[in-house]
Image (tube, rainbow, N blue to C red):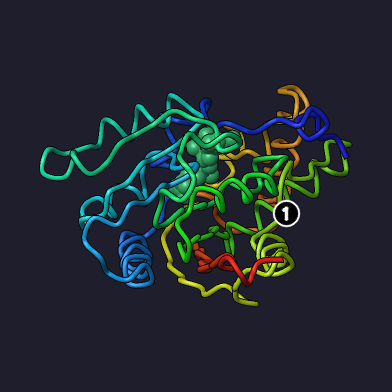
Amino acid sequence: MVNPEAERGETITFERVAPVYDSTRRMSDEVCIEITREIVVEAGNKAGTLIADVGAGTGRFSIPLAMRGCRIIGVDVSIGMIRVMLSKIRKDWRSRLQPMVADARSLPFRPNSLDVVLCFQIFHLIHEWHSVIADVQRTLVEGGLLAVGESIRKGISAEVNSQYKEIRDKRGYGYRRVGAQDIDEVLSYLRSIRCSAPQQPEKQGWVGHMSINSIIQGLADKIYSGTWNVPDEAHLGIIQELREWANERYNNLEVSREVSAEFKLAFVRFPTTGEHR
Ligand SMILES: C[S@@+](CC[C@H](N)C(=O)[O-])C[C@H]1O[C@@H](n2cnc3c(N)ncnc32)[C@H](O)[C@@H]1O
């Protein structure tokens, strides 16, 4: 499997998709609100809870948490993603959100200084994700909360994406994620180091609407990280074959169809001193 970033031990920044991230990674507002509500409740519903959102992106979770009264440091390695977050900040809660360009592999926080750390959709992008977890443990207060999450495409959008991967792999551009393969691998590792972590994350689903053509266009425009290792010329050939497959399989590629996704969320606590090792 071709995976140059993993071989070089790199991290995958979203700099190249910062301007289109929010419009192409749609997530239901209700689901975002529900997730942030659950985080606040799980963290004990205390005013001024200090949270680091690691790999915060454009602030999709940092912003609703700041609006709920939490103090948030939104950390991302991509300046472009942080710029988008900055553009969304509003004056009534701006004092509670601090965007920060930093690398999750060397978190710039003091030991025992954070109440909550969010790691949403980031461990698959970092080769050394186990050491990020160790650093998160260092920065959390005793009994602090780690929230991990990832969103998964379902239904027709998953079907088109998996066909893209099949063609890509068949043409010799197979891609293994540089970090954790999925949230289950992360949870299993956390349990192995004696964290309290659920066997199964909880799931929040939502539905939206997209045409097959717009799903394929997103792939053609290389907006997803699974397309970034494919050279442009090879990518054009893969997209061409994908369009042919779609034309045979579906009646009308322009018609808007229901697409669904779900967000998997898990709350984790590290063993407290005395319990540990
Ligand atoms: C899939 S996006 C998720 C953004 C946000 N957590 C969300 O769920 O909307 C992953 C983000 O992690 C960032 N990232 C990747 N490697 C990183 C690292 N080593 N340190 C900090 N951020 C990183 C990317 O730049 C990107 O903004």
Q: On the picture, is 61 further left or further right than 200?
A: left
Residue 166 shows up from this direction: yes
Foreground residue among 258 and 48: 48
Residue 25 shows up from this direction: no
Q: Percent x, y for residue 274?
A: 61, 70
Foreground residue among 182 and 24: 182
Q: Residue furthest front?
A: 274
Q: Residue at x 46, y 40 (%)?
A: 110
Where, by quadrant of the figure, is residue 98 drawn? Answer: top left
Q: On the picture, is 140 further left or further right than 133?
A: left
Q: How many marks?
A: 1
Using the image, determine if residue 28 lies above or below residue 174.
Answer: below
Where, by quadrant of the figure, is residue 229 drawn? Answer: top right
Q: Residue at x 59, y 58 (%)?
A: 251
Using the image, determine if residue 264 lies above or below residue 103.
Answer: below
Q: Residue at x 25, y 50 (%)?
A: 66
Q: Percent x, y for residue 101?
A: 44, 28
* Quarter of the image that includes the C terminus: bottom right
* Quarter of the image that includes the N terminus: top right
Q: On the picture, is 95 further left or further right than 113?
A: left
**Three-letter amino acid code of the residue under disc 1:** Gln
Pointer 1: what residue?
Answer: 181
* Badge 1 element: loop
Q: On the picture, is 22 further left or further right than 12?
A: left
Q: Percent x, y for residue 9?
A: 76, 32
